[in-house]
Image (tube, rainbow, N blue to C red):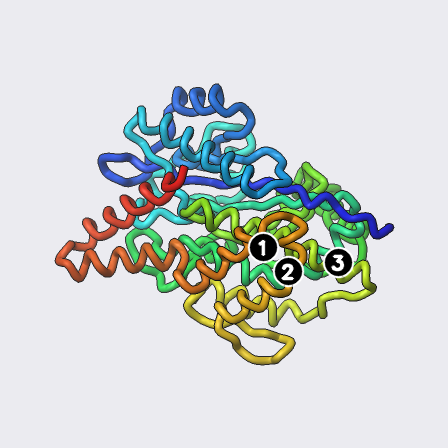
Amino acid sequence: MGNREPSFTFGIEEEYHLVDLVSRGFAAAPADLMKECEEALGKQVAPEFFRSQIEIGTSVHKDFRAARKELAGLRRTIAEITGNYAIAPIAASTHPFADRSTLETTPKARYQALAQDFAGIGRRLAICGMHVHVAIDDDELRIDLMNQVRYFLPHLLMLSTSSPFWQGEDTGLKSYRLAVFHELPRTGLPQRFESYGEYERTVDVLVRNKVIEDATKIWWDLRPSAKFPTLEMRVTDVCTRIDDAVSVAAVFACVLRMLWRLRTANQKWRSYPSFLIEENRWRAQRYGVSESLFDFGKGKLVPFASLIDELIDLIAEDAAVLGCEREVRHALNIATGGTSADRQVARYKKLIADGADNEAALIGVVDQLITETVAGT
């Protein structure tokens, strides 16, 4: 394995809930709606596990401004088409109040098989996420960087939180989505692997025994993509604001380049026990940007905004090379101004304080999500 620089090209996948514009609850996508979306967007749009979900994916990008423009166009197109059916997309990882018992699984063989496999847990999977692929075409390098970048997954999660509510309850968590998702097998923080061969042998135990067909059934927070020569970051909630989503993607790409840069100088990010990284992951899931994470080098808790400030300095050279300095700096705006989860809770509390009942306040949160999802498109 040489020191040739990877391309660090990237793509963003987002999942949205579909809501009824009258009730603001879940809306199952009619067949004609999905057909219209596919005619407009081709393979860049797909159904998801439930009929009240839809997934989009950007093309491969080198330029973050171009990626933002495309992402805005995808959101706008989905919103325009669904609007003809009195439906709207919301880029939030959980719906603030909708009852999951009303959900219908998408009638595709893959999703029906998953529903059978997941049993009762599958009926709770009313969650949406964001995945960011970054091209690392060397297998061994991909595993090496995966081992190291695990440290930063809680930071990325903190920047993205958008799931404080679950079935009408303020859970007190900023990312309740992870609590639901973690009930599935083959999720959570990936272990460290000594080589790509070890990773392949590990996965092959399940494939040979027909427990899974292939590595697409591994849903870790971070994984080597089974379809592309990329490292796929999956820990994040879907960001309600487009600029937040692009910022998270930029930070992830720059951290990977920083780790590659260290490697070319025969250095590595220090390895810490998964136990400690998991603690930061929990803090991100529970508190979001308003609290602190452990800086394990210092051995103490540090306010998140301070950590992001340091991280922006650490990856400044990489942001300059990848042309995303503005997008990376935006992470500090998120850290100081809050995420979608913070805005949802604030909206709910304000409406309650103004005299709204619980149902009206939750509908107000959905309305805010509908507006923010397409803002800036």
Farthest-out residue, right: 2
58, above or below 192, in the image = above
Residue flagged by tag 1: what amino acid is it?
Val
Query: Relative to residue 222, is residue 50 drawn left or right?
Result: left
Residue designated by label 3: 261
Q: Is residue 209 visible?
A: no
Q: Are marks 1 and 3 in contact (CB under 8 Å)?
A: no
* Mark 2 vs mark 3, CA separation in Å: 10 Å
Residue 89 versus residue 178: which sits nearer the camera?
Answer: 89
Q: Secondary structure at mark 1?
A: helix
Residue designated by label 1: 251
N-term mark: 2 or 1: 1
Q: Secondary structure at mark 2?
A: loop
Query: Relative to residue 318, is residue 181 drawn left or right?
Result: left
Q: Quadrant of the C terminus?
A: top left
Residue designated by label 2: 315
Q: Are marks 2 and 1 in contact (CB under 8 Å)?
A: yes
64, above or below 56, in the image = below
Residue 371 versus residue 69: which sits nearer the camera?
Answer: 69
Circle nearer the viewer, 2 or 1: 2
Residue flagged by tag 3: what amino acid is it?
Arg
Q: Position of residue 79 (x, y in %)?
A: 37, 32
N-term mark: 1 or 3: 1
Q: Quadrant of residue 147?
A: bottom right
